[in-house]
Amino acid sequence: MKVVVKKPKKLKKLELSVFIVLAIAVLMVGFKLLRPTVEYESKSVPIESYKEDEVYRHQANIYVSQLIDPIENPVWEGDDLIHFYGNHASKGTGDFNVDLAKLTIEKVQKPEAVKPTLVYKEQAVKDFTLLYENEDYQFYYIKDEAIRGLYKYNVDGTVYQVSEHMDLDSDLNPYVIVSPFGDKLFYLEEETHRFVTYDFYSNKKKLINIYLNEEELTRLKDIIAFSPQGGYLRYYDPDGLLYIFGSDSGNRYVDGLEGTQATFSYNENYCYYFYEGAMKTAHSGTQLGIIDLSQREIQYDTASGADYATSIFSKESSDSLFYMLGTETKDTSVFTIESLVEYDPETQEKSYSSELKGVKIKLPLTFDYQNDLFIFHDSDDDLVSYNVTTNEVSTLSNLQHFKLAGDRGDYYRLKDGFICIYGNAIYKITNLGKNMIYQFDNEQLSSLSLSPSEKNLAISTQVSEEGHESDADPAGGHLARLIITSKISDDY
């Protein structure tokens, strides 16, 4: 029997193409039917137009817009309100208040100058001068004839008459010195011409046996000074001899030493000076005197291989001191530093830092010292900073001079650091490093102003023609900026 096996028919190419197209179509229809539905909603993003009178905040800076001219001499009322006279594009010329908390600017009536009021025994005081104040009290000289005298007004409202018999200088102001931290007062009695110390907190007085002639009285604050807490008084007589008195006891602890540049330690247990007999020049010598005030003993430390530069810096919150060793170039008043020395009088140990070796400085030294950070000018007038903790040395050149709080120079001392301007920016220097506060953008500095607690810094600038149309320019196309930055604060 014959068996016939039929082979399957092959799809022709055309038929195969049709099959593939139909399969793809079926898959697409199925995907469309089964896929999830996603709806899209078109939304527009509103762009807020620039407001001419807006006070604008960007990060740590607040900008006051639309100023025609730079602001001079703004006045702070607390840390969050600043007042100034200026020319505003939409508000005109006049006096303005800027509220930094509310970010508002308002045109106000020029406030009338209001003289502070003072009352004594329920009577208004007509003529008085504030001599000193702190968080505990205010110290006044009242000139009203019936009650003329020195008065302390405590924050609790109590009033204490310190003296009604004080002597006056040629400008009819009392001869007074207040200790650095406000603990003690030193004043001259009117008739006896005796000096008296007064403790602001215990209200106790003590006579001090110092008698000054008329010429000395004109230099009172140069020849007499308190120790930091007011426990001692330093006095130089007409012959340049050094005397030290206890301000509470009136006792004489040092009696006529040949010493210059006497400096108390921060904790007041020691006084340091340079022995006059070992001075090589007016500003350098070879012998440092160390007075132990509690034991009334004197030791001498003699430099070998180098000289002392006659400037002493008391280390904060201790009895230690810093001084410079080096060599003074004859006839030039330039001192080349060999090392910075820290001396501990309790252990008599010395710590030498050579990072400043070779740096040349002008004499007499004009160092600033704060929180283990030294700031000074070298012989080229560059600003040098030295961090005692990290041993880091930094030199800044071509610094811009500026005026702040009545002082003019190329740096300003803050409560917790220093401000300087260089390289087209404002910097704050502390023992933790250097931080940029503000970068100038096609503008020149007009003025700086610190808020009372140094929380904010107001920066007024003149904007150049090239810079005033910048997209980032909060001046709004005008030629002046007022920027208030909180980067100056240690809390930033």
Image (tube, rainbow, N blue to C red):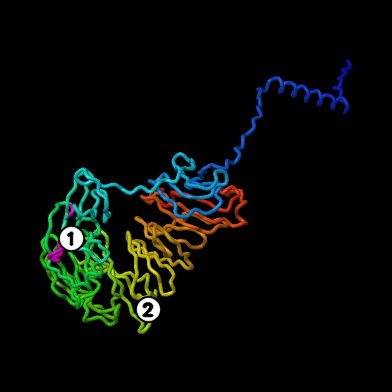
Residue 196 painted magenta: yes
Tell me the element at label 2: strand
Residue for badge 2 = 334
Q: Residue 270 in the image: x percent, y percent?
A: 18, 66
| Relative to 11, residue 389 above or below | below
Q: Residue at x 44, y 54 (%)?
A: 73
Up-down: is 6 above or below 481?
A: above
Magenta run includes residue 207: no
Horizontal side of 356 relative to 483 (left or right) equals left
Give the side of residue 15 with respect to residue 238, left or right.
Answer: right
> Alpha-carbon neighbours of circle 1 within 10 Å: few (<14), some, or many (≥20)?
many
Give x and y (percent) for residue 75: 42, 50
Magenta span of residues: 188-200
Name the residue at 72% across, 22% down. Answer: 32
Left or right, residue 299 beside residue 408: left
Name the one closer to the observer, 349 or 379: 379
Q: Amino acid at mark 1?
A: Met
Does residue 357 lie above or below 449 as drawn? below
What residue is drawn where x is 87% and y is 20%? 6
How dense is the environment of label 2, judged by Cα within 10 Å: few (below 14), some, or many (20 and up)?
Answer: some
Q: Residue furthest top?
A: 1
Q: Secondary structure at mark 1?
A: loop
Instruction: Work out which residue is located at the far bottom of the displayed protein and give it.
Output: 331
In depth, the one of 262 and 202 nearer the eye is: 202
Q: Is residue 359 left or right of residue 127?
A: right
**Circle 1 sits on which residue?**
166
Tag 2: amino acid: Val
Placement of the N terminus among the 4 image quadrants = top right
Residue 216, image x and y in percent? 22, 72
Which residue sits furthest front? 145
Observer-nearest of 180 and 203: 203
